[in-house]
Amino acid sequence: MSVISDLKRDAEKRGLITAPGFIDLHAHLREPGFEESETIATGARAALEGGFTTICAMPNTEPAIDSPGLVAELIARGSAARAARVLPIACITRGRKGLALADLVELASAGAVAFSDDGSPVADAQLFRNALEYARAAGRPILEHSQDLALSAGGVMHEGVVSARLGLAGMPAAAEESAIARDLALARLTGGRLHLSHVSTAGSVELVRRAKADGLAISAEVTPHHLALTDEWVSGSRAFAWEDDGPRAAPYDTATKVNPPLRTSADVRACWAGLMDGTIDAIATDHAPRYRCRLGDLGARRRRAHGRSRARARDRRAGERSRGHRPTCAMDAQRRVVAVAREEHATHRARAGRSRDDGRRRR
């Protein structure tokens, strides 16, 4: 104990913090399908460098994590990284399409710690009710990205004074709050465990507070950026939420476009209050690296994606036949690559035809 105490005192003298390893409930590791942005190994190592010893990997990959074989592969790659522990979160619906439930009980048996279609809210209320019931039977929570896609359609930032000043289409707070109200009602009906991802508005915090007071088995998270930044950042402000003034930058910075969008200072204060009084249970990063490619990289990237998709489809079909699973339809990446290739072929033929016509006219 004396050695640990000495190390702690030395760390504090250097302005460092000594704490148990952090757990990130919400991280996007991009593998499989988007390895140019990040892999499971690089994400796990980066997490450990930042003090996170456990991270929960969201399933919005290509293919989506909707089969026991993919869950097992994610666990194996996480273990091989020998860094932060990686816990897989599997899909609620097949391919995250919101049409049919994935095999939640089998996914849980394979090692999934929770279920989520993060980024693609489950719009069908009956389907979401069934998901809560199956997840309860499997002893797992549902992590929901609560958003009414009809209300938020076309929006690129929070709807309010700043969006009106900038002339940008907004996403109203009601798009989140109405979805959370529905999700809480279904959690009450089913008795399922519900975790609300990246809560961002004052109304949402109040809904969670009331539901907890009623004894519902729910939890909620908030992201660092929804605690530190406001929608004024879209207009060029670089003052943190607790600062009265700060430097300015050019407006319309696409780096300030997030989902849920950055909210008002009143919403930020409500999130802080919810965190302090226990209404919000955790801070989760929503870590989501993105690869910015040049146009010249697109061809090679598509060829690599096509090759990976074909190999994964082949391996997945073979694995599921050996285990007796029904084949699923989560190979959207392959279909998209084929569609892109067809479009490029049609464009090339059209250009070639125009070139021949121009040549004839010149002759």
Image (cartoon, rainbow, N blue to C red):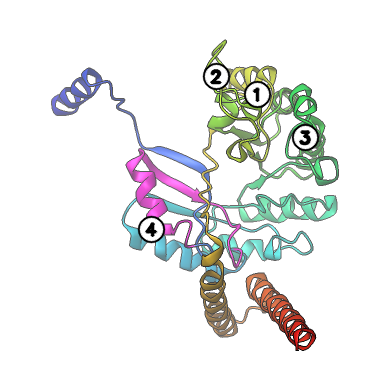
Above or below: residue 84 compared with residue 181: below
Q: Any mark on residue 44, and which?
A: none
Q: Residues within 10 Å of mark 3 (few under 14, many from 20)?
A: some
Task: Write down the residue under mark 4.
Answer: 41
The picture places residue 108, in percent across and down from the top left corner, at 57, 60
Q: Quadrant of the C terminus?
A: bottom right
Badge 2 is on which residue?
Answer: 239
Mark 3 or mark 4: which is in front?
Answer: 3
Q: Identify residue type, mark 2.
A: Ala
Between 362 and 168, the one nearer to me in the picture: 362
Indicate which disc residue 168 carries: 3
- Give the mark nearer the N terminus: 3 vs 4: 4
Label 3 is placed on what type of residue?
A: Leu
Q: CA distance from mark 3 to mark 4?
A: 38 Å
Where 210 sits versus 313, above or below?
A: above
Q: Earlier in the sequence, mark 1 or mark 4?
A: 4
> For mark 1, does the 10 Å Cα neighbourhood hold few (<14), some (14 to 19), or many (20 or more) residues?
many
Disc nearer the start of the sequence (2/3): 3
Question: Taking the image as drawn, is residue 281 in sight?
Answer: no
